Amino acid sequence: MKFILNRRTFLRSTTTGISTAVGLPLLEGMFNSQSAFADAPGAFPRFFAMYVPNGIIEEKWYPEDGTKTNFDLSNCSLREFDRLGLKNDISLYRGMDNACDKEGSNGNTHMIAISSWLTGVGIKSDESQTHRPSLDQEVAQAHNAIARSKVHSLQLAGNSQLDKPNNNRYYNPLKNALNWGANNRLLPLRSALKDEFDKLYAGADAAPGTGLDRRSQMKLSILDDIKEDRARLANQLGADDRARLEDYFDRLNNLEQSLIALENNSDNPQACPKPNIASIPNPNNGSLNVSIGDHARIAAKITAQAFECGLTHAITYCAGGEAAGCEYRDIGIGTHFHNSISHNRAGRYNDWAKIDTFHAELCANFMREMKDISHGAGTLLDGTAVLFGSGVGNGDNHKQTDIALMVGGHFGNWKHGRYHRFNGRNHGDLIDTLRQEMGLPTALGRNTVPIS
């Protein structure tokens, strides 16, 4: 009789007293036939979104010219997608305006733009304390209605810091308002990646002081902690599944070591001063980060690992809060993105385009990593929807028109390698088309945008 492994199997620690639970990648041993293994993505796709604050240089972000199916990415901010062989895994949507602009949202451009980006519905104002659930939360809810995920969703942030304290309401929680929960309330961003990693791999009975911190103190890796359960499982698997599992464990170990290195190489607090939390209604966890590239790459690895073993199905990465932003030292820019660059388009045009390109490179490398991971009969990019862009268009004049929007991954009937152009269409139509193509019951029935 063939050994059938439960899809929701976790490997657990048995001797150290640390509550550890490691999910498994998709294996043939979880299915009763190869055809079932091939059809494994599930009822709803996974979802990842990367948000860029403060807007973009629109004419540099998109290709300058070309047709719907014949366009050149080599001279625009998205060129890394072409270089990494991802052109046929993405579609571009140019000339769309944020729903907040179309639907009469009131208040500061930054706040209402980010608040409306993942909902596709204009928020009432920058003082609103409730909105509607964002797309990532709708995906998470749909998955959890079928089978509860270990972690409902992750809201990761590249730098969740607010600017220095200021009595003006311009410095308010909606600077970080990308994610809205099922209760219509704002969800906090989390930039402390080590904590989020531990959340994914902690056992059900984990208590404070367990997990990554305690393993570090004991000089013990996750793989050391589960070695007995790991060996027992390996003896029950076929050769192909053992190879898949070893590849997965190698990547998990590399990720854990990267997180420890990032923690030990702490950021310089002078570069992005920590605000007086008591003076600001701050919805985030107050951690600092100025190593933007390293931080984003590790967040991408956490996302890929979590998706691969089904620990969660909805993750967002906010590169920074609106109207905030530290220095991009990774690419030689030592001044504040919002204050010094996005408010000085003419004088800092090239630096802004360089930041746009940097963000695009981070997203492209994440998608390439997903495409390189085998999953079922395809890759992890199959059965995953990706949304990348910004809720603000030209940040210098604080417009929410001509915003950056790219859809990637393979799900529903979406056909990629397309460059769609519009003249002021509501971006909420794109968000609702995503809902419909992902099969979500929360679709609003809006007019769909072209997907082929």
Image (cartoon, grey):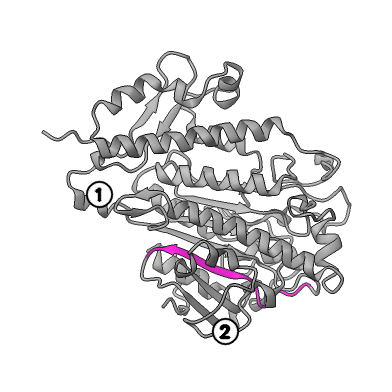
Report whether residue 13 is seen. Answer: yes
Q: Which quarter of the figure has residue 279? A: top right
Q: Which of marks 1 and 2 is nearer the N terminus?
A: 1
- Rendered residue at 45%/69% (across/down): 88
Q: Where, quadrant-wise, is the N terminus in this rendering? A: top left
Q: What stretch is highlighted in magenta?
A: 398-411
> Is 422 situated left or right of 129 in this image?
left
Amino acid type, residue under disc 1 in the picture: Phe
- Rendered residue at 51%/24% (across/down): 221
Q: Which mark is residue 37?
A: 1
User: Residue reaching furthest right?
Assistant: 167
Q: Which quarter of the figure has residue 410? A: bottom left
Mark 1: give few (<14), some (14-19) or many (20+) Cα within 10 Å: some
Q: Residue 62 carries which label?
A: none
Q: Give the residue number, with chain letter if any, for mark 2.
A: 422
Mark 2: give few (<14), some (14-19) or many (20+) Cα within 10 Å: few
Q: Give x and y (percent) for residue 241.
A: 28, 38
